[in-house]
Image (cartoon, rainbow, N blue to C red):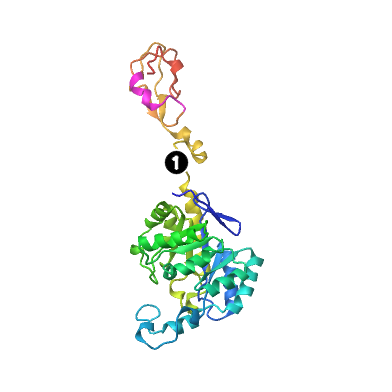
């Protein structure tokens, strides 16, 4: 596990900190700024550390075209043109100031994924505390360079990228001034099948690129995300909606408020459960030491009589000698009279061979 640590909005993020939970708003505002504001409020209430937007317009993403290249075939968005999908799903730029203001008033971080340089300039005017590079943009090295030059922390998703593409993105970010970098393992399918989650990539990204690593999760539910904590995920990003039944471009693989709360609680409890490597008894175990086995007198023994399998046994509780001494004590003689129920000690034995 990598020991690096970064900060977003004053919150330390790294292996020695609870997982940083990002609620991805995406297009689940359904074109309603009131719903967008309520999503931020519900994310805060659920315990998320941050809400993430996507800052683009249809025109900064693609062009309007009827050519087959620009049509989506299959999946959640089957039949859409790229332009129409982005036109429907985008978060209007004129909403951003109000959303940033709402997040600030609630004490939750808000940042965004910019999809071109104009979006970076715009987000800088709002003093965004960090930036996210989406999986599909990981190969857009000029965009990564632009984001890195802000000097802000950068989170990059690695969905679909091979090792060389990830390395190029990391090198570009660092070469242009990014010193706080997070890589999120991601399976870019919507929804993603759990058997293709490949969570073992999380510690590999941390090791290979010397970064804080985490998970951008598109599986259904929270099991995969919580499991990722055991593999070292320091950041978890999940799409978020008020109600899947309300529809929306990403609703099918988004969490509802109670599910987001469960993710926040369970992932942090999972992190606490990791603990540390230690052969010492925990504080919770101390009181139960007395219930381990030890050596007790189980029949009355007169001074000078030998200790035998009939008059001493290894039983609970644990106030007597350690069971490991039992074979060496057999045949030794009692120094004093011993009554049944007495925890045996070395003082009770004549010349004991305690080894």
Q: Residue at x 35, y 63 (%)?
A: 162
Residue at label 1? 277
Q: Quick check: 97 left or right of 216?
A: right
Q: Count the labels in the image.
A: 1
Q: Position of residue 100 (x, y in %)?
A: 62, 70
Q: Residue at x 47, y 27 (%)?
A: 319
Residue 287 in sight from this viewpoint: no
Residue 269 in sight from this viewpoint: yes
Q: Position of residue 45 (x, y in %)?
A: 59, 65
Q: Nearer the viewer, residue 91 or 18?
A: 91
Q: Residue furthest right?
A: 105
| Vertical order, 308 against 249 (above or below) | above
The verdict on residue 17 being magenta is no
Assign the C terminus to one quadrant of the image.
top left
Majority SS type along the magenta span: helix
Q: Residue at x 48, y 48 (%)?
A: 3
The verdict on residue 327 being magenta is yes
Q: Residue furthest front?
A: 175
Q: Which residues are magenta?
A: 319-328
């Amino acid at each position: 596990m990598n020991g690096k640590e970064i900060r977003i909005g004053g919150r330390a993020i790294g292996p020695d900190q609870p997982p940083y939970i990002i609620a991805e708003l995406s297009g689940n505002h359904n074109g309603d700024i009131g719903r967008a504001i309520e999503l931020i409020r519900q994310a805060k209430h659920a315990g998320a550390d941050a809400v993430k937007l996507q800052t683009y317009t249809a025109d900064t993403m693609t062009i309007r075209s009827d050519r087959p290249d620009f049509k989506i075939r299959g999946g959640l968005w089957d039949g859409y043109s790229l332009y129409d999908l982005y036109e429907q799903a985008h978060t209007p730029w004129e909403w951003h100031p109000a959303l940033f203001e709402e997040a600030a008033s609630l004490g939750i971080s808000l940042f965004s994924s910019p999809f071109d340089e104009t979006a970076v300039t715009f987000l800088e005017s709002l003093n965004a505390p960090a930036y996210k590079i989406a999986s599909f943009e990981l190969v857009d090295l000029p965009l990564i360079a632009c984001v890195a030059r802000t000097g802000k922390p950068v989170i990059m998703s690695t969905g679909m990228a091979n090792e060389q593409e990830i390395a190029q993105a990391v090198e570009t970010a660092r070469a242009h001034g990014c010193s706080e970098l997070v890589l999120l393992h991601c399976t870019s399918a919507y929804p993603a099948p759990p058997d293709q989650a490949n969570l073992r990539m999380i510690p590999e990204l941390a090791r290979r690129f010397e970064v804080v690593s985490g998970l951008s999760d598109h599986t259904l539910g929270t099991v995969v995300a919580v499991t990722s904590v055991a593999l070292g995920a320091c950041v978890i990003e999940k799409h978020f909606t008020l109600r899947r039944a309300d529809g929306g471009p990403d609703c099918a693989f988004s969490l509802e408020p109670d599910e987001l709360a469960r993710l926040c609680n369970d992932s942090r409890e999972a992190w606490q459960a990791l603990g540390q490597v230690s052969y010492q008894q925990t504080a919770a175990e101390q009181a139960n030491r007395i219930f381990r086995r030890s050596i007790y007198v189980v029949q009355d023994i007169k001074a000078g009589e030998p200790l035998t399998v009939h008059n001493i046994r290894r039983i609970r509780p644990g106030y007597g000698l350690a069971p490991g001494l039992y074979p060496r004590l057999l045949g030794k003689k009692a120094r004093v009279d011993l009554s049944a129920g007495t925890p045996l000690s070395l003082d009770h034995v004549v010349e004991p061979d305690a080894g």
